[in-house]
Image: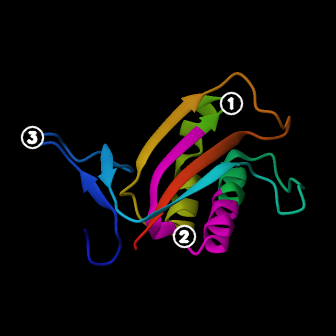
Amino acid sequence: MNGDHNVNALLPPGWPRPRGYANGVAARGRTIFVAGMIGWDAQGQFHSDDFAAQAHQALGNIVAVLKAGGAEPRHITRMTWYVLDKHEYLAALPGIGRAFRELVGHYDIAMTAVQVSALIEDRARLEIEVTAVVPD
C-alpha cells in the first residue's frame, strides 16, 4: 500500500489514467460505510440551491462522519454520486473540483456518478455515498 495512505489505485496495463477518479482501488483495514449525504448542514438546513455549494456541504458532511469513525478523507475507497441533472453536475465541475481538493484532497477513489429521477429531500440536488477503509 502507498506510504501516505492505505489506498492503491488499480490501473490495468495499457489503460490511460482516468481523470478525477480511479478505475478500482485496493485497501486493507477497518471498513466504514457512510450513508448518502446531501447538501444540508448538521441541523438539516439547506443554505443554497447551487449544485457546487451543495456538493461542498455534502463532502463536508462526509468528512464529519468519517472523523466520528476515526477516519480521514484519505481513507475513502469508493464514492457514488446521485445527481438530479447530469448537465447541472457537469456545469458545476469547476466548483466541485475546488471543494473536492479542499475537503478530500485525493482522487484514488473508485467513483460512480449516476443521474436519478428524484431524491427524498426536495431541495437536494445531489447525494453522495462513501466507503472508507482505515488501516489496521
Residue under the point 32% across and 52% down: 25
Q: Amino acid at mark 3?
A: Gly
Q: Which residue is mark 2?
A: 102
Q: What SS does tag 2 mark?
A: helix
Q: Which residue is mark 3?
A: 14
Residue type at tag 1: Leu
Residue 121 occupies quadrant: top right
Question: Residue at (85%, 57%) from the top-left corner?
Answer: 47
- Asked if disc 2 and disc 3 are in contact, CB closer than 8 Å, the reply is no
- For residue 101, above or below residue 26: below
Q: Nearer the viewer, residue 37 or 6?
A: 6
User: Label 2 is placed on what type of residue?
Assistant: Glu
Q: Position of residue 87 (x, y in %)?
A: 59, 30
Give the image quarter of residue 74.
Answer: bottom left
Q: Nearer the viewer, residue 70 or 60?
A: 70
Q: Earlier in the sequence, mark 3 or mark 1?
A: 3
Tag 1 residue:
84
Residue depicted at 16% across the width and 40% down the height = 15
Query: Which region shows up in magenta?
Result: 59-81
How crowded pointer 2 is (Cα within 10 Å; few <14, some 14-19, many 20+) is rated as few
Name the residue at 90% across, 61% down.
43
Callout 3–callout 1 Cβ contact below 8 Å? no
Q: Is residue 124 left or right of residue 21?
A: right
